[in-house]
Amino acid sequence: MTSPWTIGIIGGSGLYALEGLEDEQWIAIDTPWGKPSDEILCGRVGDVRVRFLPRHGRGHPIPPTEVNARANIDALKRAGCTDIIAISAVGSLREEIEPGRFAVVEQFIDRTKERVDSFYGKGFVAHVSMADPVCERLSKKLTDAIAAAKGKMATGATYLAMEGPQFSTRAESRMYRQWGADVIGMTALPEARLAREAELPYALVGMVTDYDCWREGDAVDVTQVVEQMQSNSKLARDVVTNFLKKLPKKRAASPIDTALDDAIITAPDQHDPKLLAKLDAVAGRLLKAE
Ligand SMILES: CSC[C@H]1O[C@H](OP(=O)(O)O)[C@H](O)[C@@H]1O
Ligand SMILES: Nc1ncnc2[nH]cnc12
């Protein structure tokens, strides 16, 4: 029997492929929102289908501001994903969340400023809830997978998404601590928002690569981030494998699967056919009825 789960995995800095997938094949998927960051690595772990996408592309040619998150989420939806887990390099804003630890993210603060962050708009207005921006069920399974891999972890983390590409100033970094943020990165928004708009349960694990510059004497650099990612990459792969292998045979419906039901406000006679055509994948479940 095939599994009801098709898991999209978005790999961040330092995670550009997944080894050991069965029947693996890189497949190009185009979308009405443009090209995703790369081809999608499709394969299986046991009977669970996996769709892996490197967020910055193989070789890391794409900076955070240029990541086409709409194309990435749309492509994963077109590739049949039922759920998405994302992995990101993050800086730590807390002494107790030291480099090498995994941070399971629960909340976001948005300081991005140059990104398109919705599939919807004029002619098809939708307001999804972002009160609980990650899928609790996926986060719990990731927590179990990290524990099984004997990784150190912090749960319930708040991720501050900054625009980049420069790292923060010390004043900004100290302010984010006061705001209650625990980890910092440049990519999980609008990704998480768009996943919700596409009715895809989404969870995020941050791999802590550095203390951000709030800490006396610390200043982030890319070499440090990459070295930390490399030294943790085996553990990260173990986490992903544990997660996939432990998925139950059945997939109970998630409220996120139908997040658009209470979100669309535009009257059908006001729908813009051009926008509807672009929404064929992300809002396909509802548009079939039109
Ligand atoms: C290479 S350091 C900064 C870079 O790393 C993080 O990427 P990702 O979230 O995709 O793992 C951060 O957000 C920046 O894009
Ligand atoms: N300190 C930091 N700030 C922003 N993005 C990061 N990615 C990894 N470390 C980071």
Image (tube, rainbow, N blue to C red):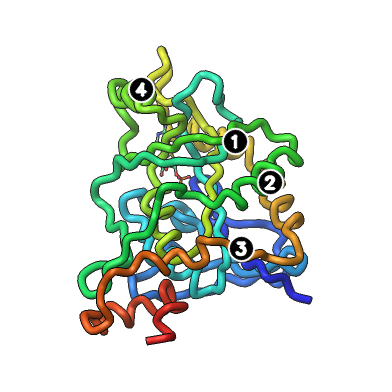
Q: Which of the marked residues, 1 or 4, is nearer the chain's N terminus? A: 1
Q: Position of residue 284 (x, y in %)?
A: 44, 78
Locate the N terminus by quadrant.
Answer: bottom right
- How far apart marks 4 and 3 lie (CA) works out to 35 Å
Q: Residues within 10 Å of mark 3 (few under 14, many from 20)?
A: many
- Three-letter residue code for mark 1: Phe
Image point (36%, 49%), residue name: 64
Which tag is nearer the camera, tag 2 or tag 4? Answer: 4
- Three-letter residue code for mark 2: Val
Image point (66%, 64%), residue name: 252
Give the labeled residue for mark 2. Answer: 239
Which tag is nearer the camera, tag 4 or tag 3? Answer: 4
- Three-letter residue code for mark 4: Gln
- Three-letter residue code for mark 3: Ile
Asked if the residues shown at circle 2 and circle 1 are in contact, with their CB atoms under 8 angstroms apart, the answer is yes
Q: Which of the marked residues, 1 or 3, is nearer the chain's N terminus? A: 3
- How far apart marks 1 and 4 lie (CA) works out to 22 Å
Give the labeled residue for mark 1. Answer: 102
Give the labeled residue for mark 3. Answer: 7
Asked if the residues shown at circle 2 and circle 3 are in contact, with their CB atoms under 8 angstroms apart, the answer is no
Tell me: residue 188, above or below residue 1. above
Q: Secondary structure at mark 1?
A: strand
- Give me the disc on residue 178: 4
- How far apart marks 1 and 3 lie (CA) works out to 20 Å
Tell me: residue 20, above or below residue 173. below
